Amino acid sequence: MPRYTPEELRSKFANSNDFNDIFDAFEDAIAQRIQDVELYRLLFWNHSLGPDELCLFGEKLAREFSGIAYDIYMWLASVFEVTYSSYDNFELAIKYYRKAAEARPSAVEPYLDACDCYDPDLNIPPIDVLLEFLKSSLDHVGNKKVIYSRLSHLYHLIGDEEQSGYYRDLSEQADRPKTSNDLN
């Protein structure tokens, strides 16, 4: 029998500062099999929770409800990106963008959103991590043009104009329709 109504869960996730209280509400939501991403967004934005607690809740949700794992990982990544401005938390943002990409390999959003984390002055997250992540998407995403374009931009930011031009050319080629000459 549920201990909390959906409205009580919303209130606890949004307003409680007591980890045990939040954890009890979370366990009750899981037991009720509630898969409402909007409800869990309130949990992720609860300012009393630190990165470790957010990871705990997010990982448990993704295991319990694989159908919403992509959304859970994207939300966790975005929370780490905007609320915690330290190197470790940018690593967590990238970690969860990677998990989102694994949950939905054809989606371009995890890759593009990860690039939006980049601060060229601080090299956070490290550019080589972003470049590798973007390149890994090319086997999975349907819209390669946006990935090529973002790769070109990142290489330009670090002064590698040769690679920037290479990916810019690939991006432009992705726009052109295939001709019979391309197939031979």
Image: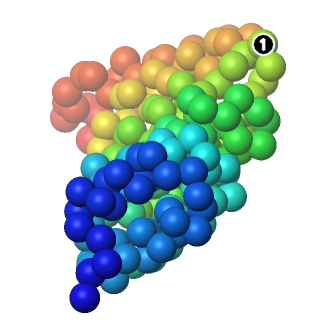
The image quarter in which residue 33 lies: bottom left
30 w.r.t. 57: above or below: below
Question: Considering the image in quadrants, where does the C terminus appear?
Answer: top left
Q: Position of residue 70 (x, y in %)?
A: 38, 57
| Colour pattern of the rendering | rainbow
Depth order, front residue of 64/53: 53
Instruction: Check disc 1 and report the residue beneath it.
Output: 121
Q: Position of residue 99 (x, y in %)?
A: 52, 58
User: At x 38% / y 40%, what residue is drawn?
Assistant: 108
52 w.r.t. 25: above or below: above
- Work out whether residue 36 can be spotted: no
Q: Position of residue 157 (x, y in %)?
A: 68, 12
- Image check: 16 left or right of 164? left
User: At x 70% / y 41%, what residue is drawn?
Assistant: 89
The image quarter in which residue 163 lies: top right
- Work out whether residue 114 can be spotted: yes
